[in-house]
Amino acid sequence: MDDVVNATALSRRILEKRFQLILKRSILDEINTLRIKQAKQLLNETNLSITEISDVCGYTDIKNLSRYFSRYEGVNPLEFRKLKHSKY
């Protein structure tokens, strides 16, 4: 989040308000959406561990990845990987 704010000439609050007004979601929601998209790709296309995927996607630990992943996808990362592999 800080990197996004620092990349603009706007204050954090103004940036958040404009982002919400235009995109109808918060900056944090957008960041997590992109991180989960990346995590899904890594779960589907690599054999990286969940811990490694958590690190690559920018989460501080596996618990944060699992919490957000479950919120967005309805299953945790390990369940997602198992479901994907069971379809083949």
Image (spheres, rainbow, N blue to C red):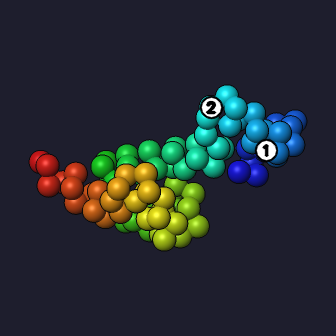
The residue identified by callout 2 is 23
The residue identified by callout 1 is 5
Q: Is residue 78 above or below residue 88?
A: below
Between residue 46 and residue 76, name the one nearer to us: 76
Tell me the amino acid under the disc marked 2. Answer: Leu
- Secondary structure at numbered mark 1: helix
Q: Is residue 7 above or below residue 35?
A: above
- Secondary structure at numbered mark 2: helix
Closer to us: mark 1 or mark 2?
2
Between residue 47 and residue 59, name the one nearer to us: 59
Viewer can see residue 15: yes
Give the CA distance from mark 1 to mark 2: 16 Å
Label 2 CA crowd tier, 10 Å (few <14, some 14–19, many 20+):
few
Among numbered discs 1 and 2, the one appearing first in the sequence: 1
Residue shown at 31% from the left, 48% from the top? 45
Left or right, residue 77 beside residue 9: left
Left or right, residue 85 beside residue 19: left
Between residue 24 and residue 79, name the one nearer to us: 24
Q: Position of residue 64 (x, y in %)?
A: 52, 66
Q: How many marks?
A: 2
Residue shown at 48% from the left, 71% from the top? 63
Label 1 CA crowd tier, 10 Å (few <14, some 14–19, many 20+):
some
Q: Are marks 1 and 2 in contact (CB under 8 Å)?
A: no
Viewer can see residue 48: no
Left or right, residue 84 beside residue 73: left
Tell me the amino acid under the disc marked 1. Answer: Val
Residue shown at 51% from the left, 45% from the top? 33
Return the residue found at the far left. 88
Q: Position of residue 47 (x, y in %)?
A: 31, 58
Q: Position of residue 88 (x, y in %)?
A: 12, 48
Q: Position of residue 5 (x, y in %)?
A: 79, 44
Residue shown at 58% from the left, 47% from the top? 29
